[in-house]
Image (cartoon, grey):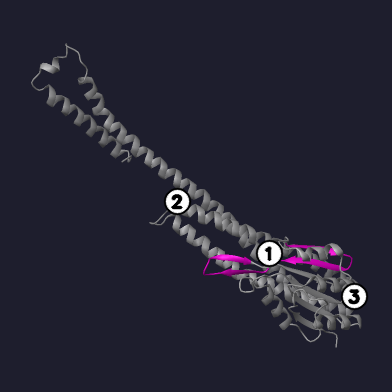
């Protein structure tokens, strides 16, 4: 039987590798293929995996630390990949990121999860789903296809959730309950989430392109039957690649849309501030006009005919009212009030 399958959860601090890990190691050394999934591997498990499968020291060091960027590196005939499975939490309208390391060799695939809370990220679910879909006679490249397919499929509901949040923000920009500061915070927060998601999605298409290039080389060098099998597998990878590119394009469009929304919000804020300044200026002018008239009649000069005129006081008040009313009508016509 060319398959040995394990989905493991080792005990932390074990003095030796888990029994199921040891069984896998023994079977691999006997010539079988190994498909291994380990959640939160211990240092001992990593050491034994390194000794058995000939993993590069630098790649193993990457597995010991979290917060790695999504990437693919090649060490001889072994590919090392850092993937970012994601899940969208509807209740919080937030993304939760997982982090998985994948080693792909000629006769093995090793998937290492670093999730601390399985309820928040679904790296474990992606891994288990890939194991569950395995065919009777899998190869490392077929198994990797299942992993990548599940990873990309998980991105689709995430980008849909982000797009829904973006639509809500755009609706709020011109809604009756518009609050500039609140909208700005929501846009900026969503931009950060989209940016993080973009960094997780973008490298996946590049990884798939490298894998497809390897398959094309194998197809050209293989026998007729092997060539047909490789070309069929290449078609499956191309389908996953198309989905990854589609998700990446949607993320780019959403990022651009949010940037535009941020600029529109700034424009709306500037327009409202400008309207406020117009109102303040208009009312200031209206109140200044009678103040000027009153200040003139408040001067202490002896030779002011209006002071001894019977209608001087009503005249001054009339001038103040007339000027203020005239200014009010002018500003009202210009829509400053």
Residue 253 seen in this snapshot: no
Q: Is residue 45 above or below residue 31?
A: above
Residue 334 lies in the magenta-colored region = no
Residue 58 location, x and y as percent?
Answer: 84, 62
Residue 233 location, x and y as percent?
Answer: 79, 76
Sequence-first disc among 3 and 2? 2
Q: Are marks 1 and 2 in contact (CB under 8 Å)?
A: no
Q: Which residue is mark 3?
A: 222
Which structural element holds mark 3? loop
> Which span is picked out in magenta?
70-96
Q: Left or right of 101: which side holds 304?
A: left
Q: Is residue 329 above or below residue 7?
A: above
For label 1, count other residues whose C-alpha is less than 10 Å away and answer few (under 14), some (14-19) or many (20+). Answer: some
Which residue is drawn at the image coordinates 71% and 61% (left, top)?
67
- Which one is nearer the viewer's eye here, 334 or 336? 336
Residue 204 seen in this snapshot: yes
Q: Left or right of 172: which side holds 221?
A: right
Q: Which residue is mark 1?
A: 245
Secondary structure of the magenta portion, mostly?
strand
Residue 268 location, x and y as percent?
Answer: 45, 47
Residue at the limit of the structure toward the bottom, as seen here: 1
Q: What count of labels does the image hold?
A: 3
Q: Which residue is mark 2?
A: 180
* Discs 1/3, front: 1
């Amino acid at each position: 039987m060319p398959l040995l399958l394990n989905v493991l959860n080792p005990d932390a601090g074990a003095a030796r590798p888990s029994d199921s890990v040891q069984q896998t190691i023994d079977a691999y050394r006997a010539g079988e293929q190994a498909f291994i999934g380990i959640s939160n591997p211990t240092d001992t498990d990593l050491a034994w995996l390194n000794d058995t499968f000939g993993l590069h020291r630098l790649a193993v060091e990457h597995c010991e630390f979290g917060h790695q960027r999504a990437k693919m590196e090649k060490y001889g005939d072994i590919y090392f990949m850092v993937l970012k499975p994601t899940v969208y939490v509807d209740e919080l309208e937030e993304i939760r990121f997982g982090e998985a390391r994948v080693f792909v060799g000629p006769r093995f695939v090793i998937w290492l999860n670093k999730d601390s809370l399985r309820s928040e990220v679904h790296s474990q679910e992606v891994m288990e789903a890939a194991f569950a879909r395995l065919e009777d006679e899998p190869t490392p490249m077929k198994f990797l296809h299942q992993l990548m397919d599940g990873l990309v499929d998980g991105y689709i509901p995430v980008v849909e959730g982000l797009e829904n949040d973006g639509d809500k923000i755009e609706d709020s920009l011109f809604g009756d309950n518009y609050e500039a500061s609140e909208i700005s915070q929501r846009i900026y927060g969503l931009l950060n989430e989209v940016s993080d998601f973009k960094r997780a999605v973008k490298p996946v298409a590049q990884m798939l392109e490298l894998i497809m290039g390897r398959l094309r080389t194998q197809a050209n060098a293989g026998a007729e039957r092997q060539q047909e099998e490789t070309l069929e597998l290449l078609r499956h990878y191309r389908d996953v690649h198309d989905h990854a590119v589609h998700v990446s394009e949607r993320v780019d469009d959403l990022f651009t849309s949010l940037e535009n929304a941020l600029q529109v919000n700034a424009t709306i804020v500037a327009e409202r501030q400008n309207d406020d300044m117009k109102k303040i200026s208009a009312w200031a002018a209206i109140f200044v006009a009678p103040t000027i008239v009153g200040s003139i009649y408040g001067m202490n000069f002896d030779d002011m005919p209006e002071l001894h005129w019977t209608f001087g006081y009503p005249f001054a008040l009339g001038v103040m009212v007339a000027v203020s009313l005239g200014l009010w009508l002018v500003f009202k016509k210009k829509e400053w009030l």
